[in-house]
Amino acid sequence: KYDTDDSPSGTTSTSSGSFQDTGTAYTYTPAATSNKVWFNLSYIGSMGGGTGQYKVTRTVGGSETDVVTKSIGANLGSHSSNNYDIDFNFWYEDSPSTTSEITYKVKIKGNNPHVMYYERSTIFIMETSA
């Protein structure tokens, strides 16, 4: 089974060196503890040069865990004005080992003094039997 969440446009910016929530979240309940949850993250944003990171977290029963963290640089995007437009898409397989409700969230950070801007992202979830 599969589902998707297309987050509304918004702007979150960070240059503090700490992760900021983008507001993109998806809640899902796996059918079996042995099942895998595949998610696809599609992200559109920009950054003012330099480097930053994005990550996806999983929260189960109030406990948050980092699922995947990736570094990105301005070289991923095309230059416009003083910013670099960034868009990327990746698949990741998660093994949550639970049938409890899961919330996946997308977070970003710009490495000071470089600012990273979030504009829009989509999470596509697909559950597969082990």
Image (spheres, rainbow, N blue to C red):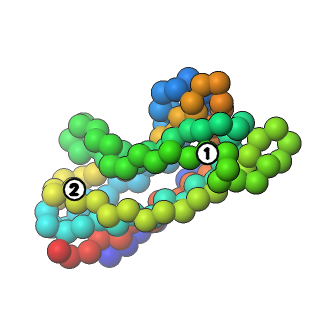
Secondary structure under tag 2 reads: loop
Q: Position of residue 123 (x, y in %)?
A: 47, 60
Q: Residue 124's spot in the image, x, y percent?
A: 45, 65
Query: Which of 128 and 74 lies nearest the eye of the viewer?
Result: 74
Figure quadrant of the N terminus: bottom left
Relative horizontal placement of residue 16, taking residue 35 as reference (left or right): right
Q: Residue at x 41, y 46 (%)?
A: 69
Q: Nearer the viewer, mark 1 or mark 2?
A: 1
Return the residue nearer the eye: 101 or 89: 89
Residue in the picture at 28% in, 38% down: 64
Q: Which residue is mark 1?
A: 73
Type of residue at label 1? Gly
Give amino acid for label 2.
Pro
Q: Is residue 3 left or right of residue 13?
A: left
Compared across the picture, whether 26 is left or right of 53 comes to: left
Between 49 and 43, the one nearer to me in the picture: 49
Crowding at mark 2 (Cα within 10 Å: few <14, some 14-19, many 20+): some
User: For residue 97, which quarter of the picture?
Assistant: bottom left
Per the image, the residue denoted by label 2 is: 96
Quarter of the picture holding the C terminus: bottom left
| In the image, residue 14 above or below residue 74 | above
